[in-house]
Image (spheres, rainbow, N blue to C red):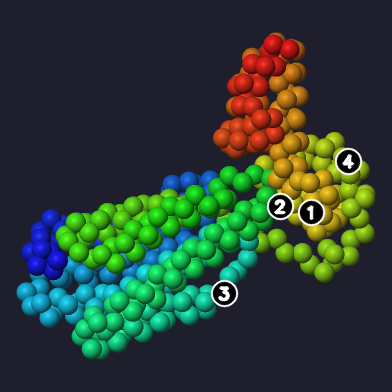
């Protein structure tokens, strides 16, 4: 493979392009505070910094590997490849895992397990560099495969828990959910694993370069469009408030339904609990007793409000659009409203409106 790579001008151009792209993305995330892709969103600062550093190391690793194209000695090429593998194992691998952790904002996850997971592979690469041999590669791959599978299993579980946390605490999930991102990143990770296990032919090198381009573009978009969420902690004084679950029906009617507080965009369960004079634990228990979560409760109120507005508009023979009524019902995104409406009614908005016209 190295004989094919040596002197490949087109590959050098691609490597150089990806390097410049990664460095520009890194500088943008680390030095620019404003959000250019989605100005209305404030992304998590920790995720932004981790991703910026990740991009910087992609650029540095590419610069290191580019010299293979110009080297003549096979020993020099092999040593460059070994050192490059060591650099990847101590920079890109742990940073990629840390980025996955940072996307889940329900709690701060410890980072020491990342060091534990990646240390054996890094030590193996150190031994390879010291011995100037890739004889340990099969053992490193044999270790990396179950670790990767275990990480995927762990992240599937954590992403599910994160989804439940979002539904229990936020009325609007737009720019908050991450399971789609996790699926995309897992696919990219698997492509990396396939490349590392095969590592044959010039085509695989081009595939790796293409994967880097997709990874940079996708992570940049993900960082810019993911809202920073506050972990809602409850102080000891919150637990001492006197309202109990059996009082909450009347309190919600008075302070949420009658005042139409549910129309407030991105209303959280903690804000609602403070408004009715209780804490979020009691409120969460109340919603559970109704066999629903906070997100479903607020969306039910908003959809009922939409239905009420629809009938009023039809009765008054006013012109309107479903998007306009959804906005007046507390939804900033029509797609969010459309999905919630179908979950509640079993019909699309268009189908429901046609059925309502026939009644």
- Tell me the quarter of the picture where residue 61 sits: bottom left
Residue 51 visible somewhere in the drawing: yes
Q: Who comes first in sequence, dot 3 or dot 1?
A: 3
Relative horizontal placement of residue 185, taking residue 340 as reference (left or right)? left
Q: CA distance from mark 3 to mark 1?
A: 27 Å
Q: Who comes first in sequence, dot 3 or dot 2?
A: 3
Q: CA distance from mark 2 to mark 4?
A: 21 Å
Q: CA distance from mark 4 to mark 3?
A: 42 Å
Residue carrying label 3? 110
Q: Indicate the quadrant containing the C terminus: top left, top right, bottom left or bottom right.
A: top right
Residue carrying label 4? 254
Judge the density around disc 2: few (<14), some (14-19), many (≥20) Cα neighbours within 10 Å: many
In the depicted view, which residue is nearer to us: 56 or 134? Answer: 134
Labels 1 and 2 touching (C-beta < 8 A): yes
Q: Indicate the quadrant containing the N terminus: top left, top right, bottom left or bottom right.
A: bottom left
Q: Is residue 179 depicted above or below 328 in this figure?
A: below
Residue carrying label 2? 168
Give how far across and how far down residue 181 sits, in percent: 47, 52
Q: Who comes first in sequence, dot 1 or dot 4?
A: 4
């Amino acid at each position: 493979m190295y004989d094919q790579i040596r002197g490949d001008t087109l590959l050098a151009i691609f490597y150089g392009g990806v390097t410049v792209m990664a460095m520009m993305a890194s500088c943008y995330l680390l030095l620019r505070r404003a959000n250019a892709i989605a100005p209305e969103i404030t992304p998590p600062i920790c995720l932004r910094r981790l991703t910026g550093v990740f991009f910087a190391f992609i650029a540095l690793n590419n610069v290191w590997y580019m010299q293979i194209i110009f080297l003549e000695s096979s020993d020099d090429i092999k040593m460059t490849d070994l050192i490059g593998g060591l650099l990847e194992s101590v920079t890109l691998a742990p940073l990629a895992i840390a980025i996955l952790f940072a996307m889940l904002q329900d709690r701060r996850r410890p980072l020491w397990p990342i060091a534990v997971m990646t240390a054996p592979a890094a030590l193996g690469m150190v031994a390879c560099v010291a011995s100037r041999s890739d004889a340990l590669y099969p053992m490193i791959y044999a270790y990396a495969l179950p670790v990767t599978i275990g990480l995927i299993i762990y992240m599937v579980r954590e992403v599910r828990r994160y989804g439940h946390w979002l539904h229990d605490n936020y009325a609007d999930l737009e720019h908050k959910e991450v399971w789609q991102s996790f699926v995309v990143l897992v696919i990219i990770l698997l492509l990396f694993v396939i490349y590392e296990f095969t590592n044959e032919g010039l085509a695989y090198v081009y595939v790796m370069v293409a994967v880097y381009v997709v990874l940079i573009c996708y992570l940049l978009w993900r960082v810019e469009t993911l809202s920073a969420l506050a972990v809602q902690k409850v102080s000891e004084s919150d637990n001492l408030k006197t309202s109990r679950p059996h009082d909450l029906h009347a309190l919600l009617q008075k302070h949420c339904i009658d005042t139409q507080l549910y129309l407030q965009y991105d209303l959280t369960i903690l804000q609602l609990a403070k408004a009715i004079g209780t804490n979020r634990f009691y409120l969460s228990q109340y919603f559970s007793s109704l066999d629903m979560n906070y997100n479903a409760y607020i969306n039910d109120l908003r959809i009922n409000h939409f239905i009420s507005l629809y009938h009023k508009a039809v009765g008054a023979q006013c012109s309107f659009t479903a998007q306009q009524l959804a906005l007046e019902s507390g939804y900033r995104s029509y797609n969010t409203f459309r999905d919630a409406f179908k979950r509640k009614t079993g019909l699309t908005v268009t189908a429901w409106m046609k059925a309502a016209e026939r009644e």
